[in-house]
Image (cartoon, rainbow, N blue to C red):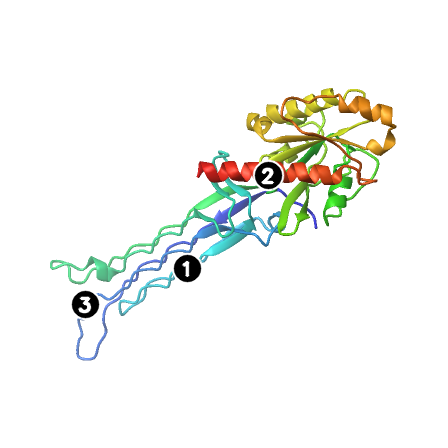
Amino acid sequence: MQFIDQSTIFANAGNGGNGAISFRREKYVPKGGPDGGTGGNGGNVIIRADRQLGTLLDFRYKRHYKAESGEHGRGKDQTGKTGVDIVLKVPCGTIVKDGPTDRVLADLVEDGAEVVVARGGKGGKGNAEFATSTNQAPRIAEPGTPGEECELLLELKLLADVGLVGFPNAGKSTLISTVSAAKPKIADYPFTTLTPNLGIVRYAEGKSFTLADMPGLIMGAHEGKGLGIQFLRHIERTRVLVFLIESVSEDPKRDYEILLNELASYNAELAKKPKIVALTKIDLFDEATLKRLKRVSFGRRIPVVRISSVSRAGLQDLLEEMWRALTAVHKAELKSK
C-alpha cells in the first residue's frame, strides 16, 4: 500500500433551506393564516479518527467534499429536512489544520475522536414565524444561510511505541523485518526506505509493542535535506528512540551526535525522549574490535547494545532494553494522570 502522510482537501457544509411563504387553503376558510414552514439546517462536515485506516491515500484522489443542504420549508407548517452530515474518516494520529493559517484545529489520536470542521447553514424562517397581531398575513420569509467552507491540511504522524533512527543503510529495515512481521524493501543503497514501516514486536507472552522503521536521516535533515522534515514529524509520536549506528563507522559517537542534533533542531522535545543505542553489523568484526566498541560511551544512562540482524546476536538484549524503557514510560504516564 502506498503511504500518504499529508493531503490538502476542501470542505463545504450544506446550505440551510429557505423558509416558505404559504397560507392555509382550507375549504370554507378563504382567508387562512400563514403556514409557511422553516427551512432545514445544512449538514456539517466532520472528520473522525478510525483505527482501521493507516494512510491518507483516499484524499489524494478526491479533494472536494460537500455535505447535504437542508430542504426548503413547506406549507402546512412543515419544516424542511435537515441535511445529512458528511463524515470523513482518517487514521488515528491525524492532525487537522486550517490550510491558509496552518492553525491546528484538532489532533485526532484516539479511535472515534472527531471534529466538526465546517458547520451547516441555518434554515430560514417561514412566514408563519413572522405573523403578529398587526401583521396577520406576512408575505416574507428568510433565505437559508450558506454553509461554512474551508481548506484543510491533513497531516498524519505515525503512532508507534519505539522508533528506529539512523543514517541510510544503518540496518533499520533489516532489524524490523527480523523482529516483527513487517516486510520492508531492503537493498544496499541509500534511501531504500521511502515510507515509514510499522511492525508489531511480540516480546513475550502477552507483551507486545509497535516498532517503526523511519527513513534514514542525513545531516541537515531538519532543514529538509534528504527526506527531511516530511518524515521527522513521525518521530514525534514515538515513546522511545533507538539509534542504530553502524559499528563499521570511523566515529560511532560522532554519528550519534549528528543524529541527536538533527532531532533536537527539528523539535527540542525529541532529545528528551528515552534513548537506546544499538551498534549494528557486529558480525563483521573480530573480538578485538568488539572490545574496542564496548568502550565507546554515548552518555550517562543510555544503554548500548551490540547487535547483528543477520546472525541475530544481541537482538534479545535489545528487545529487553526496549521493553524496559517502555515500561518506565508507561509508569511515568500513569503517575502524571
Residue 326, label in figure: 2
Q: Which quadrant holds residue 306?
A: top right
Counting from the top left corner in percent of width and height, residue 106 is at 47, 42
Left or right of 263 in this view: 186:
right
* Distance from the alpha carbon under mark 2 to that under mark 3: 72 Å
Is 312 situated above or below 18? above
Q: Secondary structure at mark 1?
A: loop
Q: Amino acid at mark 2?
A: Leu
Residue that label 3 marks = 33
Is 105 or 202 nearer to us in this picture?
A: 202
Sequence-earlier tag: 3 or 1: 3
Mark 1–mark 2 contact, CB under 8 Å? no
Q: Left or right: 252 with respect to 117?
A: right
Are there few (<14), some (14-19), or many (20+) residues within 10 Å of tag 1? many
Report which residue position mark 1 lands on. 83
Q: Are marks 2 and 3 in contact (CB under 8 Å)?
A: no
User: Separation of disc 3 and disc 1 at Cα?
Assistant: 28 Å
